[in-house]
Amino acid sequence: MTTKRPQRPPRGMRPPCPTRPRAVGASLAALTLLATAGCAGADTSALGGRPADAAKLKLSPTTPPARGQLDRADWLLEDEPDSLDLDTQGTSAGRVVLTNVCERLYQLKPDMSVEPFLAEKARTPDDRTLVLTVRDGVTFHDGSELTAADVLWSLKRHADPDMEQADEFGNVKSMARTGPREITVRFKEPDALFTKALAGDAGIVWNPRQVKEAGKEFGTPGHGDACSGPYRLESWKSGDSLTIEAYEGYWGKKPLTRRVDFRWASDSALVNALKTGAADGTYAESPNTAAALRTTKGLKQYYGPSTASLVLIPTARGGLKDPAIRRALSLALDRKGIADSGYGGLVQPWASPVGAGAWGYEKRHFAAAQRKLTAVAPVSPTADDLAEAKRLVKEAGAPDDPIVIGTDSSQGRTVVANATRAALQRIGLKAQIKTVPPAQFEEFYSDPGARADIDALVGDWYISKSDPMGFYDNGLSDSSNNWVGFKDATYDRLTHRALGTLDDRRRARLTTDIQRRFVNAAVWIPVAQVPTALVLSDKLTGPPASQAYLYYPWAARLGLRKAG
């Protein structure tokens, strides 16, 4: 099985405050004031000028290399972490911090490729066996040596049914220490995505002694980390701040930035802190946050590959249970209009339901397959597209009841919902929008009862693996995310084959066939891909711009743009 996490909906938004000159490493007192008070009338939806041209949005996995060291950086999160134990609570805020502190058996690189890391070497004697050689010379932050026994203990903790990553181990038959620095994993069936999981949270290597000593309090304020990364957790003051500092005994390349102070601010406070120089940077979870800062002096923005996408997720409740109606809607949807009006041009019209960051291998093949899909999921519908959509509706028969679109009141989702209603009306179908509060909206993802009265959800989604097959198992007949009840024996057979195909080239060919079937059946209807947006002081550079920032020690590469 693979890990899939719906993205949190963008927050409600308020108008920016006046700016002042920016300064790297501004006082945390100033940041606290902004984070707690914000300013009257702020609005991140004020995009400021013309939107970016989504078609020309340049995606790069990295930023220019830093040339100088930095004593301290002030970094913004959109939430305080719930926990720094990603086995129990895997939130993005905690991951942004912890990826600089903890290391994994494999590493997701900025270009979204994956390679062995704490597992210095890996080999596959056969297609159901993975042998890992644990890197020598690594120490945890308490100075103790990282051993194969620690790796095995960590893997077994991740695999515990009560832990967040347990589903990654569903195909694992056994895990054992088979040499002084060797771990052997045996599978029930070949598993192409397991090493990708080891580059995520399923591959974190904990210090068992520190985890056991902290007990149930592990990962909470007042307790240290249990890791081996370039930074150690220096302090966490609940409700105030969190600080990491460079670990002097780190085995690898030393970090450029000595210390990072994290604070959290949402909506206008986050925008204002960056505008005024009270913070040095953030990875913006909402494209609208980046859009509100796009023309701000003293800031630079970088956009990178991400697996995230905006999608319409149909249900089997009413009109959209017919694949012909779903295909008609996909043909009639104005994806460019959504990108420009709802997200300031910082999302890109997209013809598949997973972003290009999933292309961790065989990139040219996946890119070519993506271009072909625009025939059924166009950037903007042509007269021919609308004529074909109307033909599909006529042959299928228009449903009697309106098609109900579920959304919350956030700017981007509201634009998508309105565009979906307009597309349905253009092809002769009745439609209405059901708007619910954000907390209730989140229930749509997990509770079938909550979505009993809607025909499509305005959703956003990302996968934790740089492999499209981490998404397409959503179309399996027995998938809990197959809300529309799509059933296709050939699709199921091909999907299981791809998940067990270890050769990247062969798996890529299978995957694009599966992708074509998924999109043609409109199991989910793709709208746009959502690049990662890094907002950074123009005095700084170095960290990755891709989604790898969730799993790669980005702060270690952060530094001054100019030496000295």
Image: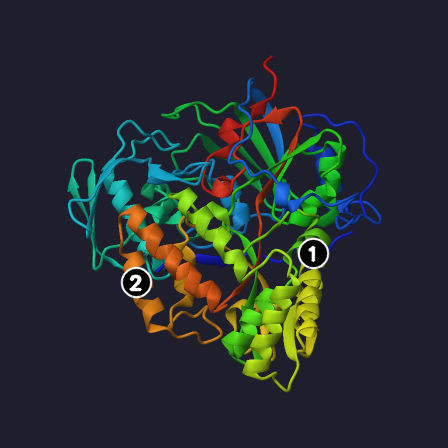
Residue 409 spot, x, y in % from top left: 71, 64
Residue 166 spot, x, y in % from top left: 35, 58
For mark 2, give the secondary structure: helix
Residue 389 spot, x, y in % from top left: 60, 71
Q: Amino acid at mark 1?
A: Gly
For marks 2 and 1, give the one nearer the viewer.
1
Relative to 315, residue 112 above or below: above
Q: Amino acid at mark 2?
A: His
> Taking the image as drawn, is residue 463 in sight?
no
Q: Which residue is mark 1?
A: 337
What crowding class fits label 2: few (fewer than 14 Cα within 10 Å), some (14-19), or many (20 or more)?
some
Measure how far apart labels 2 and 1 are at the Cα level.
37 Å
What crowding class fits label 1: few (fewer than 14 Cα within 10 Å), some (14-19), or many (20 or more)?
some
Q: Residue at x 38, y 25 (%)?
A: 252
Q: Quadrant of the C terminus?
A: top right
Instruction: Give the residue at the far top of this rendering.
Output: 564
Q: Quadrant of residue 114?
A: top left
Residue 115 is left or right of residue 9, and the answer is left
Q: Which residue is mark 2?
A: 496
Q: Nearer the viewer, residue 458 or 251?
A: 458
Model colouring:
rainbow
